[in-house]
Image (cartoon, helix red, strand yellow):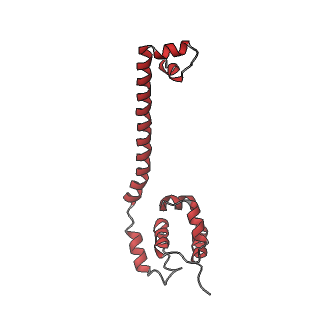
Amino acid sequence: MEKHYGQILEHVIRSNGFNISELSRLLNVNRRSIYNWFNMPRIRPEIIFKIGCALRYDFSKEFPELFRPEEFSKKICLRNPEKTAALDRSGDRWEHKYIALLEKYNEMLLNQVEQLYSSGVCRSLFNFGVPLIAEFAIHF
């Protein structure tokens, strides 16, 4: 009988109490991908290896035809915690860039509204019954 790689992978992950959401975050894939791997009879060795590195688990016991114990443990030992931290920080970096961009955009809009208000355009529109949110925002 041939090994079902996905079932073996699922058994190891669940029996050792690893969190699927955390694993998906570490591997930078969505949870659905992990569940799809569980259903696959064959999984590429690179994927199994990445999962083993993320979980710090030696899959050479389950897959001796794919990995040698010494080879796998060397790779796990070479795992760089700074790299993982850098990946976490990169998500924060994009969030900060997005917030900074939104703040600049809001500032630009407020400047435009102030210019319109000072030129009298907003006041005249407001007098004709066209309420503007920007008109309201100037006062705050």
Q: Nearer the viewer, residue 22 or 97?
A: 97
Residue at 61% across, 75% down: 7
Instruction: In this rendered view, identify the residue nearer to me: 85 or 96.
Output: 96
Quadrant where the N terminus lies? bottom right
Query: Residue drawn 47% across and 65% down?
Result: 54
Can residue 19 be seen from the camera position used here?
A: no
Q: Quadrant of residue 31?
A: bottom right
Compared with 121, 9 (above or below) is below
Q: In the current view of this chain or complex, which residue is farthest to the bottom? A: 1
Rendered location of residue 4, percent (x, y): 60, 79
Question: Residue 73: where, in percent of width, then height?
Answer: 42, 74
Q: Position of residue 126 (x, y in %)?
A: 54, 15
Does residue 88 show up? yes
77 vs 56, left or right, is left
Q: Residue at x 40, y 46 (%)?
A: 93
Q: Residue 41, image x and y in percent?
A: 59, 77
In the displayed structure, would residue 7 be above or below residue 82? below
Q: How many marks?
A: 0
| Left or right of 11, for residue 101 | left
Please name the residue shown 40% across and 51% down the image.
90
